């Protein structure tokens, strides 16, 4: 399924996207937060995992990133989580917040979620600012949350958004 924003189109990832995604993941600005993505790991984006929807982010005809939504469908804890990365050449242009709004609106309106979460690295200020523009707010620090290839642990920041808090462009 394809969903559109004003400038971005979110569409299923296809095998032809893998080289472009690998190139984006290899940029220092992205690899800093998404380390150790080789071809096998990137191929997982096309695997069709249960309760995970993965979209390529297109700006016009150009692949500029990836956004994924994971759904917890247990009725007592129902919510969705979002994660994304963008080509550094489009950083600072509002593409990230737009892609997040598009997928958030779909998760809220079509999929019926009332709460969304996102968990950037606690020191990823650019990402945190982007998420805040959409309405996400910090609710906790996840200590030693992500293990990096060098063996170090990094803290994460748990952020959430209730459906009524979504900020439109």
Image (spheres, rainbow, N blue to C red):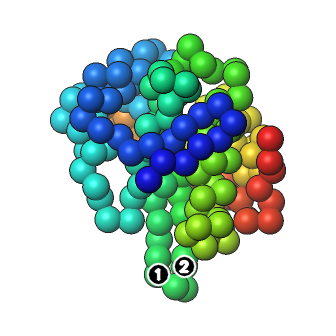
Between 94 and 14, the one nearer to me in the picture: 14
Between 20 and 59, the one nearer to me in the picture: 59
For the point 39% across and 45% down, which residue is it? 12
For the point 73% across and 65% down, which residue is it? 162
Element on which disc 2 rests: helix
Give how far across and how far down residue 69 sits, in percent. Answer: 48, 54
According to the picture, the residue beneath numbered tag 2 turns out to be 77
| Quarter that holds the C terminus | top right
Q: Which residue of the protein is positioned furthest toward the left in this rendering?
A: 40
Element on which disc 1 rests: loop
Is residue 139 among what the camera can see? no
Q: Residue 74: which disc? A: 1
Give how far across and how far down residue 111 sits, in percent. Answer: 55, 69
For the point 48% across and 48% down, which residue is it? 2
Between 11 and 22, the one nearer to me in the picture: 11
Give how far across and how far down residue 116 sits, in percent. Answer: 62, 61
């Amino acid at each position: 399924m394809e969903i559109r924003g004003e400038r971005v189109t979110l569409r299923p990832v296809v095998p032809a996207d893998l080289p472009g995604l690998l190139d984006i993941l290899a940029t220092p600005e992205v690899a800093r937060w998404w380390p150790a993505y080789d071809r096998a790991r990137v191929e997982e984006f096309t695997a069709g995992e249960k309760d995970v929807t993965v979209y390529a982010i297109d700006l016009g005809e150009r692949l500029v990133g990836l956004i994924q939504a994971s759904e917890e469908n247990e009725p007592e804890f129902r919510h969705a989580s979002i994660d994304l990365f963008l080509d550094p050449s489009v950083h600072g242009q509002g593409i990230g917040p737009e892609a997040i709004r598009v997928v958030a609106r779909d998760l809220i309106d079509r999929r019926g979620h009332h709460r969304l979460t996102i968990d950037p690295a606690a020191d990823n200020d650019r990402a945190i600012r982007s998420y805040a523009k959409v309405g996400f707010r910090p609710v906790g620090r996840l200590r030693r949350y992500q293990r990096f290839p060098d063996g170090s642990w990094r803290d994460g920041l748990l952020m959430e958004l209730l459906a009524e808090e979504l900020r439109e462009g």
